[in-house]
Image (tube, rainbow, N blue to C red):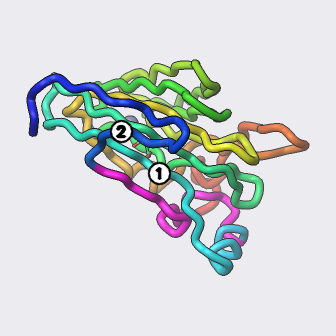
Amino acid sequence: MDTHPFGMEILSCENRLSRFHTHICRPLSALKGQFADQAAYNQMLRTGDPVVYEVYEVLRPVVAGELPHGLSIVHPGRVGDEYFMTKGHFHSVRDTAEIYHCLKGHGLLLMQNEGGEWATEELRPGRLVYVAPGWAHRSINLSETEDLVTFFVYPGHAGHDYEAIERRGFLKLVVQCDGTFRVVDNRVGSGVVER
Ligand code: F6R
Ligand code: ZN
């Protein structure tokens, strides 16, 4: 991989970077078990498999001094009352942070740590969120019409651990209620109901 400095553009009209290594599209079918309303999830899949989010990433060598970075685009939509969102993950090396900078749209970063604490931070253009080391994170698009676009950067040796979230979900769900969003308990996450 090139070890020289480089520059790039964030192409906001197209929601992409002028240079990147990977472009991942996550369709609804890749988020099996993540949305609380499984009937709504299955119903939606019967009529298609929309792209829920996309990620453009500039990869870097997997070492502590590097900074992989990219764009995350969560499209608008809902499964039942729950907004479209990313899978969410811990970093495999728990002691690693991440910065998200919102470029477009309106969303939430939902976070939780292994001690059972949770937090949300709103994402609006110009707003930056610091995901502290040890906090799992998921971006959620609260808009009915607009993409949620964020720029992220994290340490090169962080790695991604999806398993804990795939198994238990987040402690909280973010749902639409009376025209606004609510953060409610995830009864599955608390172990009351098996997913
Ligand atoms: C990297 C990071 C983001 C996410 C992206 C997609 O550490 O947090 O780049 O990878 O927002 O979300 P996931 O990875 O949860 O599918
Ligand atoms: Zn991350």
Q: Position of residue 51 (x, y in %)?
A: 55, 61
Front residue (pair 139, 19): 19
Left or right placement of residue 47 versus residue 27 in this view: right
Specify the amino acid type for callout 1. Glu
Q: Quarter for ligand 2?
A: top left
Q: Which of marks 1 and 2 precedes in the sequence?
A: 2
Specify the amino acid type for callout 2. Ser
The reply to whether callout 2 and callout 1 are in contact (CB within 8 Å) is no
User: Secondary structure under badge 1?
Assistant: strand
**Which residue is rendered at x = 66% and y = 68% of the image?**
41
The answer to whether residue 17 is above or below residue 75 is above
Front residue (pair 45, 133): 45
Specify whether tag 1 is near ligand 1 (CB below 8 Å).
no
Q: Residues within 10 Å of mark 2 (few under 14, many from 20)?
A: few
State the mark number for residue 18.
2
- Examine the image and state in which quarter residue 97 appears: top left
Left or right placement of residue 78 versus residue 1 in this view: right
The image quadrant where one finds the C terminus is bottom right
**Which residue is rendered at x = 68% and y = 78% of the image?**
47
Left or right placement of residue 134 versus residue 189 in this view: left
Front residue (pair 191, 19): 19
Q: Position of residue 118 (x, y in %)?
A: 56, 30
Magenta range: 22-39
Spot the residue most to the bottom.
46
Closer to viewer: mark 2 or mark 1: 2
Q: Which residue is mark 1?
A: 54
Residue 57 included in the magenta stretch of the image: no
User: Secondary structure under badge 2?
Assistant: loop
The answer to whether residue 102 is above or below residue 182 is above
**Which residue is rendered at x = 61% and y = 50% of the image?**
75
